[in-house]
Amino acid sequence: MSILPLAKFKTKDYGNQMIQHYLIIAWRHLTGNRFFTLINIAGFAIGIACALLLGLYSWHETHYDGFHKKKDNIFLVGVKGKSAEDEWEVGWTTPPVGPALLDYYPEVEAFTRLCLWFDEVMVTSNDKKVVETGLLGADSSIFNIFTIPFIEGNPATALTQPNAIVITQSAAKKYFGDQRALGKTLNFDHFFGECKVTGIVEDYPDNSHFDFEILLSLSSFQAINFNFDDSWGNHTFVTYVLMHEQVDPMRVANRFDEFLKDRYEPYLVKTYEKTYDEMYQGGDYYSLFLEPIDQVHLSTLVFENREGKKLQTYALGIIGLVILLLAAINYVNLSTAVSSNRAKEIGIRKTVGSGQWSVVKQFITESILITLAGLVLGILLLDLMMPYFNQIAGQDLSFDFTNLTTLAGLIAFAILIGLLGGFYPALVISSFKPISIIRRKNGGRGKVVFRNILVVFQFAICIVMIISTILVYKQLNFMRNLNLGFDTEQVLVIRRPGLLDKNQEVFKQALLKRADVMSVSYTNTIPGRHFNGHGQHFQGSPIDDIPTIYPLVADVDILGTLDLQVVQGTSFDPAHPDRKVALLNEAAVSQLQLEDPLRMIIDKGTMGDEPHTVIGVVRDFHFNSFHHEVKPLVIFPLADLQNHRFDYILIKINSDNMQRTLQQIEESWQRLSNHDPFDYTFLDLDFKRLFDRERITAQVYTVFSLISVFIASLGLMGLISYFTFKRTKEIGIRKIVGASTGHIILLLSKDISKWMLISFVIGMPLAWYLMQKWIQDFAYRTAFSWWILGLAGGIVVIIALLTISFQTIKAALANPVDALKNE
């Protein structure tokens, strides 16, 4: 009976000896071929660092809202529709939709609505004034749907009363310091005024598609007589529903038409005297849809200017994997290329009884050692790259290297790469037969062809990335130089003019007395910021014909401040600022097919039921992202600066000393606003925010294109070094029989040039297809010029030739006697 444990012990000891033997042989081989080992380790290190960095970014972006306990059952309610030529898909719904869904569908457990109107609000606490950017309106049911842990207060009642607010732990510290915040009040410079703190919650995680520091009860909107019950035409809230467990959301979505006819149709009949089917015919439609909560962040449903974010996120993740693949290809190519140097070793091992799988294990061991070394170096590179990537991409990513689970995962990841990257070379090398080795027939044309295919694939990928980078930069430059249709130079933007209270007109007149101030205008929004489309009804048209036109409400000086051009009719008259008039843009005239726009009167819309006569047409200007065509716009003038709440002041400046001018304007502001914060920017800088995603994409693509080319060049350098070494004697003989240095260089370079040409032929159409998909997101886009393809191909060829030039020139200039003396 004692023999069995002994046998087990001997088997285990033998296994340990074999592993030790594999490691010793692997170490000897790797240190004996330092040049190729360093190339492989460097390639894997860069590949692993890039894959981890870009994978971390993609994982972060695609896992928003994953912390909610009920995330699988939470859906955003969206609206999609078509009216005439206008088609839309948004995440903003009307106030009655949420309660109506809960009442109509037994599958719906709860709903909540968010109000995202409040970009910036001035908050006063104990004579301390703070500009708050994290204020949202919310139903009390928000805590039943989203995971928002309470520290103090009762989530069931916290937001049920008007003027009640729930604040985060950080907000409590910001406004009240070490004092207990529950029960205290904050004063808001808005219609809801003084609000009482009824709850304190934990700080809301960053990886959510919406963020907040203060939640305001929606019942506070009673102060402005907000219509929650029957405002089916007012898309002002973001609505979410929570489904019961095990409910298929398609059961709800498939009955949306029935729901709208039951709940929305009475509003249509009362307002327009038309049924749902009569209202939406001839291809027009209005419908709802459900969007899973984890898909909202990468969409444009709730927030503007996120076009292309989903594509960018997935593209960067794929680029990380591609760079890692390029490093693995280097290993495959170099391992199979130098395999003939190990032919005798393999022959002897097989002669003395080693099987093929024993040899495979040996080479897999070497591959794993290289990837583990690459992992260590890659982690160091990742730590160095992370701050720069965060700065470029506007992220705050971090990697916890001390977490044992993370480290175990990284090691497993490296071993997996080693197995995948080393399996093919191990199979090829282990397949050598001893008799073939003795006869020196271990080369194999199939192996050479496969190696060439991998080189071609590497550089085809490089060509795709270079073409992509060039086109992204070309589009970015195109947008920067596109005629915007308005003047952005030296236009100062001051936020929250309401802080001036009754001194708005006084402040404007004080500025206009300055020689360096050309014009001043108060406005509800500015180009590049949020524009809400409103239904505007023209006098004499059918009651249900209410086209969506984007309003710009400002004082009469807006045209001069932005240098907007009137192309038909007349402009606003500063001598009569209170006239009920309006200006349309060219897009409104053309898209709405207005034959005589100067005879049109807007009798219902943004300005209520007060008729406004159209007196002119302004030239189109870009007030939104270049992802969209210029939409129909109407400009309404307002003369009453004292009683209307504007959001911005635009100041056209002509100054040689901008710093001094800003200081003096700030002094006037402080004097007239009771020393409230002077918050300003410049219009040109503010508008350029719209290019941020393209700018980030261009910078990231540039960096990782260079890395891809560098890795491919590393592999190419290793291959050419080896091939040159193998042909040393051939080169010596050629030189003795009269071959020139140029002929030798051409001989060694022609295969590389052929590979580059094939790479270009493959990479060019692939790049063209991918970038056509990307650029289609822009309504205004640059041309995909053919010179981009030529430039990308030229860059890759030049880099490849420079990479091999040292070795080829060195071999061509070598003394042939040295090459042949050992023959």
Image (cartoon, helix red, strand yellow):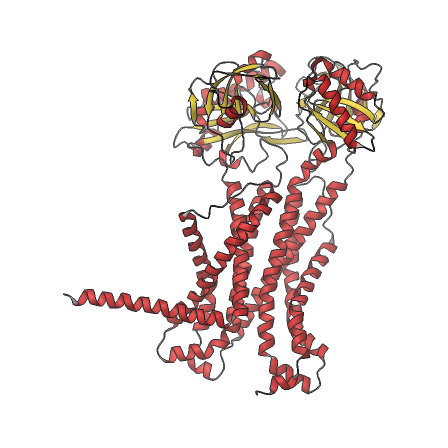
Residue positioned most to the front? 178
Task: In the rendered view, tell whether residue 135 sits above or below residue 21.
Answer: above
Query: Would residue 213 appear left or right of 596 to someone viewing this image?
Result: left
Quarter of the image that includes the C terminus: bottom right
Q: Quadrant of residue 743?
A: bottom right
Task: In the rendered view, tell whether residue 305 sits above or below residue 218.
Answer: below
Q: 455 and 688: which one is in front?
A: 688
Residue 671 locus on image (x, y percent): 73, 18
Q: Residue at x 73, y 32 (%)?
A: 682
Q: 271 and 649: which one is in front?
A: 649
Task: In the rendered view, tell whether residue 320 sits above or below residue 133.
Answer: below
Q: Quadrant of residue 696?
A: top right
Residue 268 locus on image (x, y percent): 59, 18
Q: Is residue 625 visible?
A: yes
Task: In the rendered view, tell whether residue 425 sits above or below residue 509.
Answer: below
Q: Residue at x 43, y 55 (%)?
A: 411
How many badges with numbers are in the image?
Answer: 0
Q: 130 and 755: which one is in front?
A: 130
Residue 770 locus on image (x, y percent): 63, 50
Q: Residue at x 52, y 59 (%)?
A: 44
